[in-house]
Image: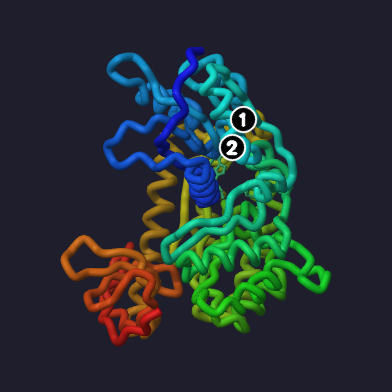
Amino acid sequence: MQPVSPPQTYRVKSFGCQMNVYDGERMAELLAAEGMRPATEGEDAELVVLNTCHIRERAAEKVYSDIGRLRREDGSSPLIAVAGCVAQAEGEEIMTRAPAVRMVVGPQAYHRLPEMIAEAVEGKRAVDTDMPAQTKFDALPARRKVGPTAFLTVQEGCDKFCTYCVVPYTRGAEISRPYASLVAEAQRLVEAGAREITLLGQNVNAWTGDDTRGRPVGLDGLIRELAEIPQLARIRYTTSHPNDMTDGLIAAHVEVEKLMPFLHLPVQAGSDRVLKAMNRSHSRDSYLKILDRVRAARPDIALSGDFIVGFPGETETEFAETLSLIDAVGYAQCFSFKYSARPGTPAATMEGHVAPEVMDERLQRLQAVLNRHQLAFNQASVGKRCEVLVERKGKRPGQWLGKSPWLQSVHFEGDVAIGDLVAVDLQEAWPNSLHARLLHTAHA
Ligand code: 5AD
Ligand code: SF4
């Protein structure tokens, strides 16, 4: 490949989950620490990082078409790096299929981007999909200025091996980042402007570590420590696995005021046969019992989940069990997906793949039920007084947008600033948001 001059500008495009958003931010910080600056809107970046997602649907195809779209009118391309889970899963294959790509870097190797860019500038092409435990985080620069809400990856990878899922292959085995470096990163995020931190992990509630006195602690121990940071107002965590929902974590929802009353606890399906075929290692009943314990501790908690419709072999009766589970729980908000066969996963070769039109129809019915519950949850909040963390300006003049403790989008008018935590009265509810009246400002 032709040598090129070192890139001065970059653009990182992240797809998929919140962990990819976090990784994208860290890559941007890394590039900025190397002296590059982000391309402004409409500007042609000299380096483009496509931080990809592989979890569902023709993910790889989308990446190839995104690469094609980066081609300039004169036939040249920026320096292109493919990062994220498609990079991990496809590796060398990307180099063969997309000659314009100079770098392929997996989610555990992106701290090596500066070296790879230097090689790419010389005309070389490099693939790094190694999975060294831990080294990435130690090699990244300190956090820079952030908005009022920030992500903090505390745990990565997954050992659960649900039969439909690529994560154990693309993100590797479960690792927990050490306690001290997480506390330090959280402190820096707060110094840089964060008022809310969301702890991230594929199985965030499987996080374990040793506290400053060397005692083993779970996620609740880390949450309790972070709650001591004075300027930090709110703590959230996602995504949790039912099997790792400890008594300590449930108790933290009562005892730690800064821990928000929200729990994302995916169940995926409501039928025990399907759950077993998915290798979920919990049953419908054991899942519901966990939620009973959570609700007994924190009755106002907003519950959230993930659902897959049309898993191989799913019958209409089994699908109806998912609908009845949703009715039994009454979720505040959820994510729902059509099953998508991921090459290399056990479910991809199972019998009884469900026809696409059946999946479409089931997804529509499922989402109708979820929307009904979401609206009901929002309507039940009308009349409540709560705090909202102001995140940005709304579309209308004088309007502001923020989140309630239950992660609802709330808009209101008044004299506030981004990052303020303000008291409001929730007044009107829609499926995706609420309108509120500002009571008073508790300036940061
Ligand atoms: N097909 C459809 N949905 C999937 N998910 C993970 N793998 C698949 C797949 N192969 C969904 C699950 C998971 C969420 C992050 O994505 O619901 O909880
Ligand atoms: Fe995938 Fe299951 Fe692990 Fe979640 S718990 S990341 S769905 S294998």
Q: Residues within 10 Å of mark 1 (few under 14, many from 20)?
A: many
| Residue at the image point whose x is 52% and y is 38% from the top | 53
What residue is drawn where x is 48% and y is 44%?
A: 32
Q: Residue furthest left?
A: 397
Question: Label 1 belongs to which residue?
Answer: 89
Q: Give the residue type that dot 2 points to.
A: Pro
Q: Nearer the viewer, residue 196 or 125?
A: 125
Using residue 168 as the reference point, say whether residue 142 is left or right of it. left
Q: How is the image coloured?
A: rainbow
- x then y, percent, for residue 191: 51, 68
Mark 1 to mark 2: distance in Å?
23 Å
Q: Measured from the top left, where is residue 308 in percent x and y?
A: 53, 47
Query: Looking at the picture, how far across and down is residue 223, in whole percent?
Result: 64, 72
Instruction: Tell me the residue at 41%/38% (across/down).
Output: 11
Residue for badge 2: 312
Identify which amino acid the numbered label 1 is placed on. Answer: Ala
58 versus 3 height, above or below: below
Q: Is there CB contact under 8 Å for labels 1 and 2? A: no
